[in-house]
Image (spheres, grey):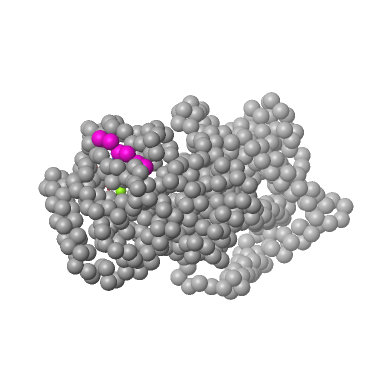
Amino acid sequence: MKNKKNFELWQVAVIGSVGLIVFLTVWEGAVRSGLIDAFFLPPPSAVLKRMIQLSTGTDAVLLRDIRVSAVRVLVGFALSALVGVPAGLLMGISPTMRAFFNPVISIIRPLPALSWIPLSMLWLGIGEEQKYAIVFMGCFASVLVYTTDATMRVDPLLSLAARNLGAKRLQVIRHVILPGALPNILSGLKVVLAIAWTCVISAEMVGANVGLGFRIWTAKEWSDTGQVLVGMISISITVLLLDILFRLVERALLPWQKHGVHR
Amino acid sequence: MTETLIKIQNVSMTFETRKGRVEAVSDFSLDIERGEFVCIVGAAGCGKSTLLNMLAGFVQPTGGSISLDGDIIKSVEPRCGIIFQNYALMPWMTVLDNVSFGPRLKYISKKERHAAARLWIEKVGLKGFEDAYPGELSGGMQQRVALSRALANEPDVLLCDEPFAALDAMTRQLMQEELVRIQRDTGKTVLFITHSIDEALLLSDRVVVMSARPGRVKAVYKNDLPHPRKMEVQISERFLELKREVWDLVQEEVMRSIRERA
Ligand SMILES: Nc1ncnc2c1ncn2[C@@H]1O[C@H](COP(=O)(O)OP(=O)(O)OP(=O)(O)O)[C@@H](O)[C@H]1O
Ligand SMILES: [Mg+2]
């Protein structure tokens, strides 16, 4: 999207920081002035204090929670990509495969990851495998659909051009379809990565004894709203960091795309 | 001494569509000699691209046959390199990788194919842009890349489907001159489709006028304008005379196709 005014990066950063500070100040002020009960919504200063408590000293559980949740997300996400991307490519290339698998995919895809929790707990308990399974079930069909779509969107003229230069069927797939679909596959995966987080947090709230979802849920049992907020903010920060990481990977894989300029 | 390279014999192409049969090309015959530069002009929708697609082997004629150097074209034919109107470069490949793509598909070593590609890149005037991506180049430059990509694959024939139609007038003029120069240097056989009679007269040894759909050969003109065909030639008596003749025929067909569609 094109901004009407084209700000420099540092200007964007400054304006953004001001916005953030205003938001936090209003929040802090609203609680201190008694407008909002600190029990329901602790002020940013209290949240920060709680965050420091939870990440240092003897009960430094926060970093471990973040690590455990992130690993669950990444493993589940990687599994669904590992299966979903090749399957999606196959479906994108072959109309027969598409016709064969489409009905099954359309049944699985609308199911929210939450709806897999009962079955997965019965089958796998509340261990790591169950978390991976939830993420996989929540993500796989989306990866598949995004990849199929990306594959079908590759300009057929490019395939013709490659065949004209002597490319055989497999060479067309390797040299044209794959690289041509990659940008859309990656943007699909970025969306799926966010879905994977939702899956893990939900699964952890229902059955887990470590992880950010679990931390938020137990805090609620103890009416520790500070800790609830710490958990929520940790999710935001982790997701943001992973997103930045993902963008870096994307940039490295797609050097030919002009990044940042158009988006 | 001349030698027939392409033999198009009574070729027809009928498409089955939901609205019925569309006869795009009908009973089209033409022989093209090795090293010849032939331009085809014709009204919009008269089957020019269809003819080119058959020569490239993308589709098979429903009647008649096309042979290249004595072999009937039955499948995709890499000996006929295509230049598309929209360049069709791989956006994720650098200029160097695009140009050496054909040889890469034949598993020619990187060193060898890059060396050959560099020569072609230089020949089309793109030295220094080897590592650029197509998205960073102007339309004219992209079409130069497409041209060198086709040439680096060492085809016998260049098939051009209105390759300069999307370019601005000045770039087009330069590209036309360059194509003639390269064709005369390499002795490649070229079949070139265009809407522009000026372009046809500037480039070709022969101009083929196609009839309105279904396309067949309406007339063939030997283009005896002297080379190089700079400005002076384009305002010479002979040029204008040829242009008038070709234009009269094309106009007739355009009017016919408009009437038939109405
Ligand atoms: N795959 C196809 N299926 C059905 N009809 C087709 C197909 N390809 C071409 N046609 C029809 O055949 C006719 C000739 O098409 P073609 O593209 O060869 O014309 P053209 O001379 O290249 O036109 P233009 O000058 O617009 O490029 C058109 O009426 C077109 O609609
Ligand atoms: Mg056409």
Say which of B207 and A84 sits in front: B207
Q: Quadrant of residue B228?
A: bottom left
Q: Which residues are magenta?
A: B5-11
In this view of the protein, which residue sits in the foreground, A196 or A255?
A: A255
Residue at 37%, 33% in the rendered image:
B72
- From the viewer's perspective, is B180 left or right of A57? left
- Residue at image position (61%, 32%) is A116
Seen from the viewer's position, the closer of residues B117 and A169 is: B117
Q: Residue furthest front?
A: B1
Q: Please name whichever residue, B65 or B255, is drawn nearer the observer in this view of the structure.
A: B65
Does the rendering let one see residue A112? no
Any magenta on residue B156? no
Which secondary structure type mostly characterizes the magenta part of the structure? strand
Answer whether residue A118 is visible to the viewer in this image: yes
Could you tell me which residue is drawn at 77 percent across and 61 percent down? A49
- Residue B184 occupies which quadrant of the picture? bottom left
- Residue that extends furthest to the right in the rendered view of this protein: A58
* Residue B38 in the image: above or below residue A93: below
Q: Is residue B74 shown above or below A186? A: above
Find residue B40 and report its horizontal and vertical position in percent.
27, 50
- Image location (x, y in percent) of residue A122: 68, 26
Q: Point out residue A57 in the picture as x, y percentages from the top left corner.
A: 87, 55
Whether residue A107 is situated above or below residue B103 in the rendered picture: above
Instruction: State left or right for residue A198 relative to residue A48.
Output: left
**In the image: residue A190, left or right of residue B58:** right
- Taking the spot 69% from the left edge, 36% from the top edge, the residue there is A131
Horizontal and vertical percent for residue B243?
20, 61
Horizontally, is B83 left or right of B42 in the view? right
